[in-house]
Each structure stands twice: as C-alpha cells, then as structure tokens.
Image (cartoon, rainbow, N blue to C red):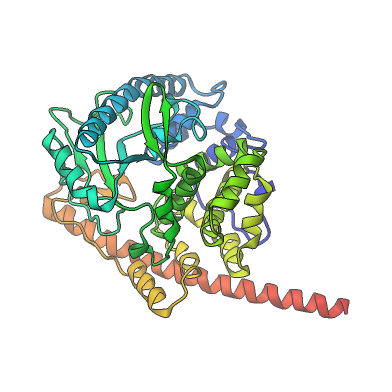
Amino acid sequence: MNASILESGRRVPQIPFEVRALLSALQLSKPDAAPLRKLSDEEWTRLLAFCDIAHLTLPVARLSMEGFPDWTVERLRTNLADNTLRFERVKATYREAAEAIEQAGIEHLVIKGFTQLPDYVPEPRFRAQSDIDIFCLPKDIDAANSILQAIGYGPSGIGISYARADHVETLVRLGDWRWKGNPFDPEMPLGIELHFCLWNERVLQIRIPETRLFWERRTKRTVDGLSFSCLSPVDHLGYLALHIVRNLFLGDWIVHHVRELAVFLHSHADNETFWQAWNESHSPSLRSLEAIAFYYARAWFACRLHPLAADEIDRLSATRRSLLNYFYVSALELMFQHNKDSLWLHLAFLSSRREKWMILKQRLIPAHVGSIHSPSVQVRNRRIVQSRDRPLWWQYTAYVFSRFAAHGRANISTLTRFLKWRHFRHSLAQNLAMDSHMRD
C-alpha cells in the first residue's frame, strides 16, 4: 500500500505480501502494479484464491496484465468471458422475478448488484453477482416471498442464521446445477434476497429514520437493456456507505464494497451538483456514518474526495477520528485473522449504556453455532477446510472448538489493542499539552 496514505499513528497491515501488492495496484491515485509483476506462481495462486472469495478477481482483470504469468492472464480472461455470459442469466433472472412481483401489484426496488453500473463499476463483465437483492416495503415481504416460491424458488436451507440479516432467508432454484469450482459459472443459478430494511436499527442500535425517505425518492434506470426501479443517485451512495458501515460493525468483509465506493468518489470528486444535492438531502447524523465509509475508501485506495465529503470526515468527533486512525487496518487483517476491533468505533456511535452493553455482549460472545449439518462446519473465515474424509462428528467437534478458540483469541486481541489505543491517545494528548505549555 502506498506509504503516502499512511498517517501518524496507523499500523502497517498484517496481511500477506501478495495482497499488499494487489492493494497497491488498485490505488486510484498513483497505482503501482510493479509488486504484482514480481509475484511467484505460488503467490499468484494464493492471491487469485483470495480474490475469488473477496470479490476482487474482476478488478484485477481490469488492470494491465503485462508482465503477469501467462496462466494468470488466461485464467483472468476466462473469468471475464464467463462473467460476460453470466450477466445474461442475471438479467433473465431479474426480469422473471420482477414480472411475477409486479403482476401481484407489489412495488420494489433493486439494491446492490447491477445497480452499481456504470458509476461504481464501468461494465457488467467487471462485476460478479451471485444474488438479486430486492427491497420491498415490510408489509409486502411475505406476499413477495410467496410469489417467488410459487414460480419455483425455495428457501436455501443451508443452516445459517438470519438473525442479523436485513433480508429474509435467501431463495434459490438450483434445478440440476452442481458447483464445479467456478465462481463465474454462466450456468450457476442466482439466489434472490428480499430485503425488509435499508438500515437495521434493531441489530445496530443506531437510528437513521430518514432511510425511509429513500423509498420515496426512488427512480427508474436502464442498464444494458434492463429496466428497473432503484435508489436515487444520492441515496444510492448513502446506502452503499451504510452497507459498508453495517458490515464493518458486524465484522464482515468490506474490501470490494469500499473499492467500488472509492471508484465513485474518485470519479465524482469534481461533481459540484451531485455533492450539493447530497449535502442538502442527507442529515448530519447520516452524513457522519457515510463519512466512515469515505474514510476507508480514501485510506485503502487513495481516492480523491469532493471538499464536502472530506469535510464530513473532519467533522467526526476526536474520539471517532482517533479510532479510525488507529484501527483502519483491522478490517483488512480481519480477512486473514479474526478480530473485533470495529467494536470500539461502533460503541462510539451509541449513546446509552444499555445499547453499548447489548452490542458489547453480542460481539464478544458468539451468538450462533451452526448445526452439525451446516455448511459452516466446512468453512473457516470464508475458506473451505479440507477435512471431508474425516467422520462428521470429528469435523463438527473441530468446527465448534475452532469457533470458540477464534472468538477467544479475537476477544483478547481486541481488548489488548483497545488498551494500547487508550494509551496512545493519552500519550498524544500529554505531548500536545506539553508542546502548548512550552510555546506559552
């Protein structure tokens, strides 16, 4: 990562060299792909495996591939070709689902996915999509769910908890398709996720009532011949920023969302009309949360910011800015070693002790342990564990042990880092006070 974007008090990310090389190549101001060209075949293998699960493979394919190993170039070109074909399935899936829902008189809008085109991702072939995300008013969710099941979709039944999700259980229609190891398989069916909120106040304990206005300001767009209702441009930015903050606070991966946000911020840094509309449409409390996502976009990918966006970062309280400066790399390290450092920033947005205690308890104590038949038994931090030759009881025991061990290590690490942050902040305040006294 470019040294120029590292500010005083920040830590160098404890992530593999090949991932640091990738982040340098994906910078929007002064990108440097030279480290990528020095990777060995083994490092490229690890990097591409990481990119597949981090949704960064196609951004890599957008880079100049001069100097990349031939097999890497061929692999990336195949991924692009497959994803180009896959977008035809995306469009067909959405058209079928939308027609069924609309015929029942239910209004909806599309979020995420192909709505990112073209401002956040320039072309359909450069964005992977595994689900269609549809928002309906809460009163219509059950009816929409029944309609989709009537045309052949059914609950995924994969045994994961939806307690903290913004949508009901994912609906799928697999047919006779089977996973062949290709995340860009043109034949792979898409799931459909029916969202009942754009910001989950119950889960996050932060109230943003004005997200309900997003529905009233919805608009219609067309992408590659596909017409759909979606959020207005200003609210689209707001929702993506909130989605990043949501995932950050819940300990999920955010890197590809942050990269897409950075692309938008960089290319619209001079769009005065847009940013004036954003400033007038979104309240200070909403903009303060969006500023968190803007901060990550600038810190990780060195994007330009419009002065109004940069000002929102500067308006964050001293505590929130200090936490960002100290822990900004933790969400990168999270992809390789579980941590809960974002907890402290989350608590800094809460006002009551009851809310803080609730979030503290939820993050420090694992709330859900998968059943013995859950796919999570075979997964550690999004990576499949090769233990299928072991008895099921052995695999489940290993899963439960690893889950509690990971939480224990993360809790100790998070508490230790918090104490270090407190010490760092106290020392910084003392030094500033001493400097002021000496000047006086």
Q: Where is residue 77 in the image (x, y as percent from the top left)?
A: 43, 20
Q: Is residue 371 left or right of residue 429?
A: left
| Residue 276 in the figure: left or right of residue 179 | right
From where the camera sits, is residue 36 visible?
A: yes
145 vs 67: above or below: below
Question: Residue 47, relative to residue 353: is it above or below?
Answer: above
Q: Quarter of the image containing the N terminus?
A: top right
At 42% across and 65% down in the image, what residue appears? 206
Query: Residue at 57% across / 70% down in the picture?
Result: 421
Measuring 28% from the left and 30% from the top, which residue is drawn there? 94
- Quadrant where the C terminus sits is bottom right
- Return the residue found at the far right: 440
> On screen, 397 above or below 417?
above
Residue 252 image offset from top left, x and y in percent: 39, 53
In the picture, residue 219 is in which quadrant? top left
Q: Residue at x 59, y 46 (%)?
A: 277
Residue 49 at least partly seen: no
Residue 325 lies, in percent from the top left, at: 60, 60
Q: Quadrant of residue 420?
A: bottom right
Image location (x, y in percent) of residue 394: 15, 55
Q: How many numbered callouts?
A: 0
366 in relation to 244, above or below? below
